[in-house]
Image (tube, rainbow, N blue to C red):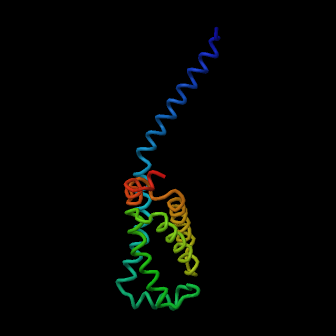
């Protein structure tokens, strides 16, 4: 017959596993909402920057000529590419269409943006670090259940593989 300590530890372990299972189900429910919030937070920053750039595109081109040091590209091409990236990629990220690729492209864009602006403050650099980490997580783990990618995959053959 098992002694009292064995019964207590067995019961305690069962309760711990039950609690862990409950915790896992709760996280499974709220994780997609947290992922969506993360996507909205990062996308908002980049999209607002893109909107600022198109308000006065002549000024944007001038900034790319004299302020930003984007390597390998002409200032005009860099201005067009940067503005397009800031307006298109955040939308794709939020709706989760090509979500991993959108996050990866914004991750790289974020690095280029931080490195290309020589007068970036310590606070601005910290913000870029946070965006970079969020984008890297989204690129690695995908856009989550609240995304078109998830819906399309669920409805197509990729859900079976």
Task: Note whether 66 is above or below 47 in the view shown.
Answer: below
Q: How far across and how far down the image is residue 127, in percent?
A: 52, 67
Q: How far across and how far down the image is residue 152, in percent?
A: 38, 58
Q: Nearer the viewer, residue 128 or 31?
A: 31
The N terminus - image quarter:
top right
Task: Note whether 3 is above or below 26 in the view shown.
Answer: above
The answer to whether 11 appears left or right of 38 in the picture is right
The residue located at (56%, 73%) in the rendering is: 111
The residue located at (40%, 65%) in the rendering is: 97
Q: How far across and how far down the image is residue 139, in percent?
A: 52, 62
Q: Nearer the viewer, residue 156 or 37?
A: 156
Q: How far across and how far down the image is residue 134, in percent?
A: 51, 61
Q: Nearer the viewer, residue 13 or 119?
A: 13
- Residue at the farthest top position: 1
- Residue at the farthest left position: 55
Count the labels in the image. Answer: 0
The residue located at (52%, 68%) in the rendering is: 104
The residue located at (38%, 88%) in the rendering is: 57
The answer to whether 137 appears left or right of 3 in the picture is left
Dividing the picture into quadrants, the one containing residue 42 is bottom left
Dividing the picture into quadrants, the one containing residue 88 is bottom left
């Amino acid at each position: 017959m098992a002694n009292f300590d064995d019964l207590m530890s067995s019961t305690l372990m069962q309760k711990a596993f039950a609690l862990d299972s409950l915790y896992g189900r709760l996280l499974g429910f709220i994780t997609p909402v947290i992922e969506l919030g993360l996507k909205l937070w990062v996308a908002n920053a980049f999209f607002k920057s893109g909107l600022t750039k198109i308000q006065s595109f002549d000024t944007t081109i001038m900034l790319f000529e004299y302020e930003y040091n984007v390597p390998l590209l002409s200032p005009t091409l860099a201005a067009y590419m940067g503005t397009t990236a800031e307006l298109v990629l955040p939308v794709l990220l939020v709706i989760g269409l090509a979500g991993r690729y959108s996050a990866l492209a914004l991750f790289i864009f974020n690095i280029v943006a931080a490195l290309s602006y020589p007068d970036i403050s310590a606070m601005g650099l910290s913000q870029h670090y946070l965006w970079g980490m969020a984008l890297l997580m989204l690129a690695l783990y995908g856009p989550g259940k609240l995304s078109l990618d998830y819906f399309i995959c669920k409805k197509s053959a990729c859900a079976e593989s």
